[in-house]
Each structure stands twice: as C-alpha cells, then as structure tokens.
Amino acid sequence: MILKDNKHILNGVLIFSILSLSIAYFIQYVLGHKPCNLCLIERIPYIASVILISLIFILNKFEKIISIIILLFFIFGAIVSFYHFGIEQGFFNESLVCDLGNNANLSKEQLLKQLESSSIVSCKDVTFRVLGFSLATINTIISIVLSVIIIKVIKNYDKN
C-alpha cells in the first residue's frame, strides 16, 4: 500500500513530468524550435515516470520496485543531459546519436538537396534558452533533483 507521504511526492513528480513534457512539446510545435536527437532522448525519463507512477497508483503494489526503476530513468536522464550540456559547452564531441551524417561522398547538388530536406538539428546548437540557460542545463539540474526526490520515496518504503 502506498504511504501517504509517498503518494503526495509521487503525485508531484507525476504532475511535474506532465508539465515538463507539455512545455517541451509547446517549445517544439508552437514556438517552432526543433529538438536535436539528445533532446528527444532526454524526454524518455519523463514519459517513463508518467507511465510508471500511473502504474503504481493503478496496481497499488510493487511500489518500491517501480520507484527504483523510475530512479534509474532519472539517473539516465541526468547523465544524458549532462553529456548534452558538455557538447554544448565544447567539453565533449558529438556522438553517433548527434551525427548529422557523413556527407563527404556527396556531390554539391546532392548535399544541397539533403540540406534543404533535412530537419536534423546539431546537439551543440542551443536553439532555446530560459534565463540564459539551455534546456539541457536546466534538465540536468531537474533530473538530479528528481533523482534525489525518488531516493526519498524509496527510503520511505524502507521505513515500513
């Protein structure tokens, strides 16, 4: 059975995850800022938390195991976001996930055609900022905070 404190915390994380995804989709589809591949990957922990927290409330069992899985998703999110931040700052090189493709063997016409039809955004390009911070920077901080919050939830299960 879900502890009362954990229920409130998980409700908060659920609402925050839905809000975060809504903002990401608003920036993408309404404001027209195309996300890079890493930006899309960084949404996975939020989608997973919406599904898994809903599952906790529906099943009303396996809360600790599902909470550990949610924690792993947010740790994954923090690592990917930090890596994305590092790419933006020039600390790391872009990986195959960010690779825009090897265009060395294309003719000028083929390259121009590919550039015109391509909607791929480089992971090092910051297309949207909030208070001067990139979304990858903000997501790194949020993922770490949410990981700590989920650790508190897991510890609450251990108390009982």
Image (cartoon, rainbow, N blue to C red):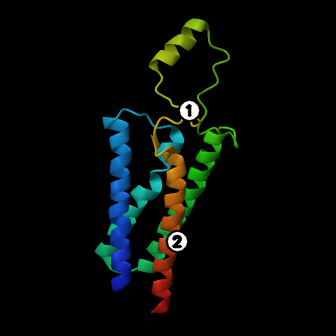
Residue furthest toward the bottom?
A: 160
Q: Amino acid at mark 1?
A: Ser
Image-based side of 27 in relation to 40, left or right: left
- Quarter of the image for residue 100 reads top right
Q: Residue at x 57, y 37 (%)?
A: 123
Residue 84 left/right relative to 153? right
Quarter occupied by the C terminus: bottom left
Local secondary structure at mark 2: helix
Vertical order, 149 against 103 (above or below): below
* Disc 2 residue type (three-letter): Val
Closest to the observer: 90 or 52? 90
The alpha-carbon separation of the residues under discs 1 and 2 comes to 31 Å
Q: Which residue is mark 1?
A: 122
Q: Is residue 31 left or right of residue 86?
A: left
Residue 137 placed where, x, y %? 54, 50
Quadrant occupied by the N terminus: bottom left
* Mark closest to the chain's N terminus, 1 or 2: 1
Residue found 51% across the figure and 60% down from its top: 143
The quadrant holding residue 19 is: bottom left
Residue 1 visible to the viewer: no
Query: Residue 44: x percent and y percent?
Result: 46, 53
Do labels 1 and 2 touch, CB within 8 Å? no
- Number of residues whose C-alpha sits closer than 10 Å to that of mark 1, classed few (under 14), some (14–19) or many (20 or more): many
Numbered circle sitting on residue 148? 2
For residue 109, above or below residue 91: above
